[in-house]
Amino acid sequence: MNWFDLAIYFQRKEKWNNSYHDSQLSANYNGRERRPSESVRPGQALKNQMNMNRPYRSIVKMIVLAMVLTVFAGLAYGNDDITTSISEALEYYKNGDYTEAVSSLNYAAQLIQQKKGGSLESFLPNPLEGWKAEDTTSQAAAGAGMFGGVSAERQYQKGESSVTVRVVTDSPMIQGMMMMFTNPAFAVSDGGKLEKIARQKAIVKYKASEKQGDIQIMVANRFLVSIEGRGVDKADLKKYAEAIDYKKLAALP
């Protein structure tokens, strides 16, 4: 089982626990009145009411956020595609067209994520001596699940050797990886070892016989740095990991 599979496992486990808890509540009280002897769990009534109002509250939050962003973004950057989309969303909202309002806000959010992905590119290291590097790339996946989030990556080559450095944030996968960093048993379950690289906790997995491996580093519980190599010495793999400014990355908004 690799890091990605373990991350998926932890995410699905949490969702299953939540679903099981909800089904138990439904089974206990579905189809009949609650008896006087059955006490209501503290805060459950309020929680139920909040769940009923969730769609309305979500729209209100999005509109309030849009208003704030419009004011500050307009002052700082003037008119661009992001502020234009937010302004359009407000107009749609005022006219009662909530579907188009949400669509415009989602589009603005996607553009903001793209800008965030661009800022991550600056943390990808320059190639080591004797290595060549491709241009940096970034993407913002708005979809739900393990593949959502913002990421930036760069590939490096030296003859038959190759290394890929990737920085990921705002992804559900990070939650699963965090559990691996806090539980050594899971961290070493697939041949990994806990090490310190540039003062950061790292999970290092390397097969000397195949000259391939990867390094996973969690930064400020928000960023996952991944260095993967094939046909590469472990020393070079660690050098790419050490070339990243983790202190600056942790301070990124």
Image (tube, rainbow, N blue to C red):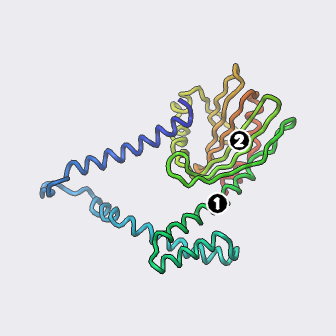
**Residue lying at 62% horizontally and 45% vertically, measured from the top left:** 224
Q: Is residue 165 left or right of residue 5?
A: right
Decide: is 128 above or below 45.
Answer: above
**Where does residue 215 sit, x and y in percent of width and height?**
66, 35
Q: Secondary structure at mark 1?
A: loop
Q: Which residue is painted at 74% across and 44% down in the image? A: 154
Horizontal arrangement in the rendering, residue 189 relative to residue 72 (left or right): left
**Callouts 1 and 2 close, C-beta under 8 Å:** no
Q: Nearer the viewer, residue 120 or 244?
A: 120
Q: Nearer the viewer, residue 227 or 87?
A: 87
Q: Specify which label sits upstream in the sequence, 1 or 2.
A: 2
Q: Tell me the tag on residue 253.
A: 1
Horizontal side of residue 44 vs 198, given as left or right: left
For the residue carrying disc 2, how many other residues have a C-alpha within 10 Å: few (<14), some (14-19), or many (20+)? many
Residue ID for mark 2: 165
- Please name the amino acid that badge 2 sits on: Val
Residue toward you, 199 or 227: 227
* Quarter of image, res 71: bottom right
Residue lying furthest top: 209
Counting from the top left corner in percent of width and height, residue 120 is at 69, 53
Q: CA distance from mark 1 to mark 2?
A: 21 Å
Amino acid at circle 1: Pro
* Circle 2: element type: strand
Which residue does the image show at 34% across and 64% down from the upper left?
A: 50
